[in-house]
Image (cartoon, helix red, strand yellow):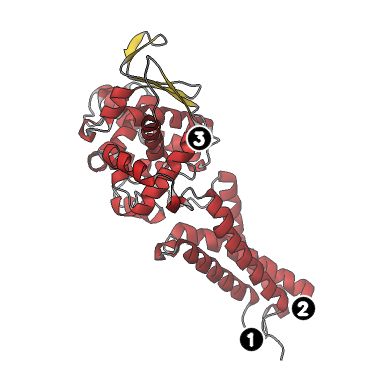
Amino acid sequence: MKSIIPYHEVLFYGIVLVWGLLRYHYFKSKNDDYAESWDVPNFPQYDTLLQNKNPYYAKLSMPGKLKFISRIRLIREELEFQGREDFEITEEVKVLLCASITQLTFGFNSPTIPMLKGVVVFPSIFYSRLTEAWVKGLAMGNGVVFLSWDDFINGYKDSSETYNLGLHEFAHILRLQALESGFSDERLSMYFEDWEENGTDAFEDIREGSQEFFREYGGTNKAEFFSVCIENFFEVPQKFEEKLPDVYWHLCYLMKQNPLNYTEDFNFDRQDAQLANEEVQEKIPEYDVLNSKFEYNLWQFFGSFWFIWLMLILIFQNFISSDGTPVWARMSLICVVIGLVVRIQYYQNFRAIQDREYLYHLFLRVIPVSIGISLFYQVFFS
């Protein structure tokens, strides 16, 4: 009995399945910071420390906490720590400093900020020869951050003051990274200038004294404005969203997290952007299909190019299989199902297929590729 589906096509499905399994269970597990974090060494010690001294961490689910601690461990391996004026760099100091960075980058693919090279810690306020003044913190263009430990700790004690030295200084380095590009999350580089432009009115209002939500220091320059926004973003997100929804929601998109979303570990995805667009004047992009403008434009082209493929289909009389099903449609459907099954099996939750950004990405790739390969089959194997 002759098979309805050619063996070449079956072979293709097998290749898609094997690639999907490799992608999620090998390559993705290597890049996912929390893929193996269920066995984080010394988890109870980390958990006790962070639960008491980092409110952001305390609100995470257990998987979120494991991911958070795994990221701390990765950041700690990348950074150099130095103490000044007899300040001792203990394990607790390293963990809390790395936790501040982890909080800042929690929505990104990579927990580290490549431009950040080291942290120098003073016991308290210190004198800077560069600024010729006594300061609490400094972020240098060479990637080194200087901090007063007393002020760093106080920044996490009372969020209502909206002053968090760690987040403020590390945000300066993140901004430099965004302007220099080279970060693993290209959205930060791609969208940063747009975000600053959207926040121009708020920035100018601070400078003119007509904006009371942000402290006056945020109007010093664009760099300080971003750092002050980051402080308010994490310290008082509810007030931030109420007072300046446009700035807040665009910052959610930029940072790929929403501090108001406690139930889903501060997640911010395509669906969240759609909901936010009901409140803001300047619309937030509802796509982030690929990580670079070139790749996005390339796949946009192929996504629309499938109409041309359909025209080519009509040229080939034998493009319909023996059961009357268009080969490209059958291949696309089966490949999409394979992709969804593998994804659900890896993440083990229904939200894995509710992500419209992922589904859009999947269809955008699968349909053109399936059409092209089915056309190839018809030309060379029929």
Horizontal side, residue 179 vs residue 369: left or right: left
Horizontal side, residue 165 vs residue 10: left or right: left
Depth order, front residue of 64/214: 64
Q: CA distance from mark 1 to mark 3?
A: 58 Å
**Residue at the disc numbered 2:** 382
Give me the residue at 63% from left, 72% from top: 328
Residue 304 in view: no
Depth order, front residue of 302/16: 16
Give me the residue at 55% from left, 68% from top: 336
Give the farthest residue toward the right: 380
Q: Amino acid at mark 2?
A: Ser
Q: CA distance from mark 2 to mark 3?
A: 56 Å
Q: CA distance from mark 1 to mark 2?
A: 15 Å
Q: Residues within 10 Å of mark 1 (few under 14, many from 20)?
A: few
**Residue at the disc numbered 3:** 77
Expressed as whole percent of the image width and height from the top left, the position of residue 68 reads 40, 45
**Precedes in sequence: disc 1 or disc 2:** 1
Depth order, front residue of 304/370: 370
Label drawn at residue 323: 1
